[in-house]
Image (cartoon, rainbow, N blue to C red):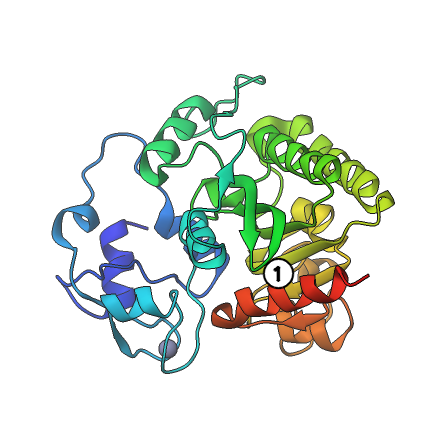
Amino acid sequence: MSTTNTTRKTLGLETVEPAVTPPPASSAETALAKKPKLRGAKSRKRDIHEGLWAKCTKCSAMIYDKEMEETLKVCSKCQHHFPIGARERIHALVETCSFEEINADMTSVDVLKFTGVAAYTSKLEAYQKETGLKDAVITGIAKLGEHRVALGVMDFAFLGGSMGSVVGEKLTRLIEAGTDKGLPVIIFSTSGGARMYEGMFSLMQMAKTCSALAYHSRQKLPYISVLTNPTFAGVMASYATVGDLILAEPAATIGFAGARVIKDTTQAELPPGFQTAEFLLDHGLIDAIVPRKEMKSRLVAYLDFMNRR
Ligand SMILES: [Zn+2]
């Protein structure tokens, strides 16, 4: 599938490109749309665009670029939550200038010398250039209302938010910093799962992060996990689901294996709304669905409650 065709299909227009790339409905499409070019092929998408309007992928409303900034990338007509970058989310969440990033320069090494369609190292370079991130998570200490918190925010734009050794190590160090300083931990997850380019090293991060959280928990410190669209596989099976409080953004797709894999394996029809935040709330896996614009005030309220002596 070429980028140009995807664009035409999504927008129904030949030459107009949204300033804010509208996220496609499924996570697979999101990953495709966000993929940086690895082999110097010219992208028409990058050449034409920088228009002022984006089209909502859910209700087809045209949304003004500035409006998208103000609503934190939520469609004002249908409340569809578009993907939001980690830095943008942190900026919207914490008190001004209170975020102190930790382990900002940690980057992955290609231990397995992995080569598929492209070498892992060239993928890393391409995504670092495209996103301005070193890896798929940003961690740091910040102030939320009156509370100092250890905050980790994942970014799906970096290799599908996949959890490699850097994501695992940065989150582990964040949680340990939280334990040392006696701070609550908040992690915003979005991920396709473990990073296949790092094989077993990725899977080890599941145990590592959860062990760090267990020590954090022994100090009677709260951990809030926020699941955003999409959160899957190794991340779901580790730190994302062991929160004292588990929140999710509206309509986020959340699960372990993908719906198609489950359907093919079980040969059973899946219930309507399967693997959505709303379905998981009904079935008790998550505690609350919080719209993005309310996220800050709700987190502050939860922290107020949890910190009451
Ligand atoms: Zn909409």
Residue 211 seen by the camera: yes
For the C terminus, the image quarter is bottom right
Q: Residue at x 61, y 29 (%)?
A: 165
Q: Is residue 284 above or below residue 149?
A: below
Q: Residue placed farthest to the right in the image?
A: 218
Pick whichever, 63 or 202, lies toward us.
Answer: 63
| Relative image position of residue 167 (x, y in whole percent) | 58, 35
Q: Describe the element under mark 1 as helix, strand or loop.
A: helix
Callout 1: 10 Å neighbours few (<14), some, many (20+)? Answer: few
| Relative image position of residue 147 (x, y in whole percent) | 62, 54
- Residue type marked 1: Arg
Pick whichever, 24 or 266, lies toward us.
Answer: 24
Q: Is residue 109 above or below residue 305?
A: above
Q: Residue at x 29, y 79 (%)?
A: 61
Asked whether, in this view, residue 226 is left or right of residue 12, the answer is right
| Relative image position of residue 173 (x, y in whole percent) | 66, 32
Q: Quadrant of ligand 1?
A: bottom left
Q: Residue at x 64, y 28 (%)?
A: 199
Q: Is residue 277 above or below residue 44?
A: below
| Relative image position of residue 287 (x, y in whole percent) | 73, 69
What residue would you read off at disc 1?
A: 260
Q: Is residue 243 above or below residue 301?
A: above
Asked whether, in this view, residue 86 is left or right of residue 38, the answer is right
